[in-house]
Image (cartoon, rainbow, N blue to C red):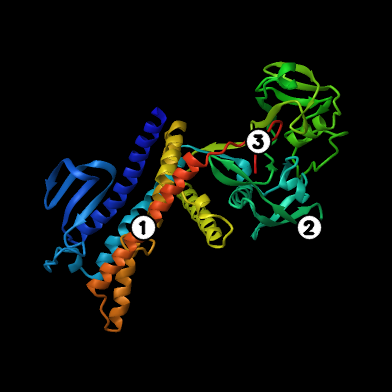
Amino acid sequence: MGTLLFQAAVFVLVLGAMIVIHEFGHFIVAKFFGIRVDVFSVGFGKRLTGFKRGDTDYRLSLIPLGGYVKMAGENLDEAATGAPYEFQSKPKWQRLCVAVAGPVMNILTALLIPAVLVMAHYEMPTYLSQPAVVNAVALGSPAETAGIHRGDVIERIDGVSNPTWRQVEDIIAFNPGQELPVTMRRGNETVNLKLNVATTEIEREKIGEAGLLPFLGANSKIVVIGIQPGMPAEQAGLKVGDQIIAVNGKPVEAGADPATTPSGDPNNGPLYGEADIIHIIRASNGQPLTLTVKRGNETLNITATPKVDDGNVRLGFNQGRKDADVLVTRLGPVAAFKYSWTENLRFISLTKTALGQVFAGKRSAGDTVTGPVGIAQIVGQAAEQGATQVFQLMGLLSLNLGVFNLLPIPVLDGGLIFMLLLEAVLGLFGLPLTMRVKERMMQVGLVMLMLLMGFVIFNDISKRFINRSSTPQTVEQPKQGK
């Protein structure tokens, strides 16, 4: 209960701040053009407190979900007096500027937040910006089934040429259950493959998974990140945090560059990654294995006999990577805003891809959209990770709010922009956009918005409280990469 209240409180603060920023955009531009603003409210409903300055009542209202600006002559059901300070009395271009100002304020905020964060602290795994050279593939994964090998370079995936690892991970994550064309460079030859992306569920959201593992740098190490109770690894004394440096005397060379050390034979040569270690365990035929591990300043030999569990030969531990190469710095203003611009474009592109898949029938709308319940949960989880995560999420929500409000749906800012442009075009032919037509458009827009909100709220509740599902954990499987 306490967690839910915390998530709700953070959600109210974050969403409220983004909506107030949105409304401030309308407010400041309306003031600039001499439009009388009667109310600037933080929150909705009954007025709790505030003050009046000039013509505007600045108030704090009872329901803390955002806020609103009320301009003179703004609503279609108001009786227009023709006074020069009324919204409807202003030229169309000025009304257009007022309508655009709210979304623009959100988009500017979405650009500002990431820029400020990376000027204070920028931290990024270096592999994300590097060419997609495959370090390893998880056993039994779609990548192994497709025939991808260590040392292969992804030259093209789903139409994207020479992708970085970040692009590869994004494409795979956003294509669960889809078949992707992949072109690999293997030595001097080009290999065309089909990658059937698997589907995994994280926090009840469907994500693509292929089992492709990137090279994390020369300093990376393979460590134990989990022990399954009652399995041979626990009984033999293996502990979380142990660094695996050899298996049956074969050295683990986790920091070896796959570009210069392509796939070898794990039965005879070095072990380059987690998949090689799993191969040795499964090929043991029930014979004891010796894991050489580094624990603090000690080097230990731990002997255990694998056993069959859930159809596979296992010792019962999870592997992960440690000491990956990470760039830690502070970006200057120009680099910071360039980074922010790129990240916002990336997010818009991913959103467009997901929505395009919905309309193409490749993805269900229920798996794609998230409403207030889901957003509240995500914001609450971000708050538990720290202020930086909350601010990053605020930037994304601000961008979403800005772009969503530009949709040409009456009652949204985009709907007003559409009607102003339509009115201007019709005016070129001497045709008026009557008040009756405007009212009907607003009614249709309101119905559309209510249906959309009803769908996303029902979808949130269904995914999070009705159709709960648990994802079984696998053991001895690599946990890094896509």
- Horizontal side of 281 relative to 107 (left or right) equals right
According to the image, label 3 marks what residue?
479
Q: Residues within 10 Å of mark 2 (few under 14, many from 20)?
A: some
Instruction: Say which of 431 and 31 sits in front.
Output: 431
What distance separates the C-alpha of mark 2 from that of mark 3?
29 Å
Task: From the top left corner, tell me how far across and down residue 173 is, in percent.
Answer: 60, 48
According to the image, label 1 marks what residue?
449
Mark seen at residue 190: 2
Mark seen at residue 401: none
- Image quadrant holding the N terminus, namely top left
Instruction: Say which of 354 and 158 sits in front.
Output: 354
Q: Residue at x 67, y 17 (%)?
A: 296
- Residue 220 figure quarter: top right
> Mark 1 and 3 residues: CB-CB less than 8 Å, in contact?
no
Type of amino acid at the residue the image marks with label 1:
Leu
Instruction: Say which of 201 and 225 sits in front.
Output: 201
Tell me which label, 2 or 3, sits earlier in the chain: 2
> Mark 2 and 3 residues: CB-CB less than 8 Å, in contact?
no
Q: Residue at x 65, y 60 (%)?
A: 159
Q: Residues within 10 Å of mark 3 (few under 14, many from 20)?
A: some
For residue 107, say whether it is visible. no
Task: From the top left corner, tell me how far across and down residue 39 is, in percent.
Answer: 18, 51
